[in-house]
Image (cartoon, rainbow, N blue to C red):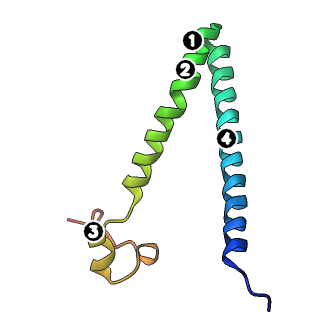
Amino acid sequence: MPQITFVDALTFGIRSMTRELAKTASFSLTHLSVAVSVAYALTGNLRTAFAIGLIEPMVQTLAYFLHERAWKPRPAESSAQGLPPQRRQAEPRDDFAAA
């Protein structure tokens, strides 16, 4: 089995990161062009469309961050059942029990 050197691993990591950065930039440009196009179709004003197209991705990024935080399991939830967060079962609810 060939031995991987530090330089080989570093080179692979840089290539991988470069590809990921290029993919991120590509997605950002795609997102921007879609946002500007939709805003222009709705407003008919290019200046307004660019303003919306530049602001919307920033707001969307914040919304994504908050969404991920809301869905993140809390330590008390996972440790109370002794299971990792992805293996937890929903507890039965008595909301609909006859009174």
- The three-letter amino acid code for the residue at tag 4 is Ala
The reply to whether callout 2 and callout 3 are in contact (CB within 8 Å) is: no
Q: Residues within 10 Å of mark 2 (few under 14, many from 20)?
A: some
The reply to whether callout 1 and callout 4 are in contact (CB within 8 Å) is: no
- The three-letter amino acid code for the residue at tag 1 is Thr
Between label 4 and label 2, give the one nearer the viewer: 4
Q: Which mark is residue 52?
A: 2
- Residue beneath the point at 68% across and 28% down: 34
Q: Residues within 10 Å of mark 1 (few under 14, many from 20)?
A: some
Residue that numbered label 3 is attached to: 94
The reply to whether callout 2 and callout 1 are in contact (CB within 8 Å) is: yes
Element at badge 4? helix
* First in sequence: mark 3 vs mark 1: 1
Quarter location, residue 82 = bottom left
Left/right of residue 48 with respect to residue 4 in the rendered view: left
In this view of the protein, which residue sits in the foreground, 9 or 88? 9
- The three-letter amino acid code for the residue at tag 3 is Asp
* First in sequence: mark 4 vs mark 2: 4
Q: Which mark is residue 48?
A: 1
Q: Residues within 10 Å of mark 4 (few under 14, many from 20)?
A: few
Residue that numbered label 4 is attached to: 25
- Residue beneath the point at 39% across and 71% down: 90
Element at badge 1? helix
Q: Mark 2 and mark 1: span between their CA atoms?
A: 6 Å
